[in-house]
Amino acid sequence: MNAPNDVIPVPASPAIPPIAPPAAEDRVPPSLFQEINARRAQVENPELLRRLRGL
């Protein structure tokens, strides 16, 4: 157990301003992510990745 004099007070954390959601023109359509994943699946070599993970 800690003695009462061993307790160090913790300073209050500064207030963090809320993060605004991205603007409509900065949003990426979900179809773009689907296209990226499809291309990645064509390029990646599952057997090679399995060997690299085993190292």
Image: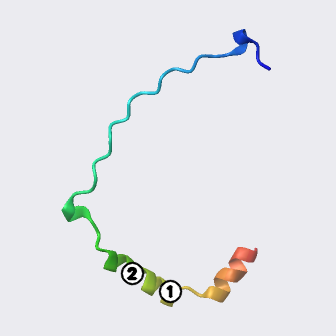
Q: Residues within 10 Å of mark 1 (few under 14, many from 20)?
A: few
Quarter of the image for residue 1 reads: top right
Q: Which residue is mark 2?
A: 34
Instruction: Identify residue type, mark 1.
Output: Ala
Classify 54 as above or below 39: above
User: In the image, is 23 to the left or to the right of 8?
Assistant: left
Q: CA distance from mark 2 to mark 1?
A: 11 Å
Q: Position of residue 4 (x, y in %)?
A: 71, 11
Judging from the image, what secondary structure is the residue with disc 1 in? helix
Quarter of the image for residue 33 reads: bottom left
Q: Which residue is mark 1?
A: 41
Q: Which residue is at a point 67% across and 16% down the rendered structure image?
A: 7
Quarter of the image for residue 47 reads: bottom right
Q: Earlier in the sequence, mark 2 or mark 1?
A: 2
Q: Which residue is at a point 33% across and 75% down the rendered structure image?
A: 30
User: In the image, is 8 to the left or to the right of 14?
Assistant: right
Residue toward you, 12 or 45: 12
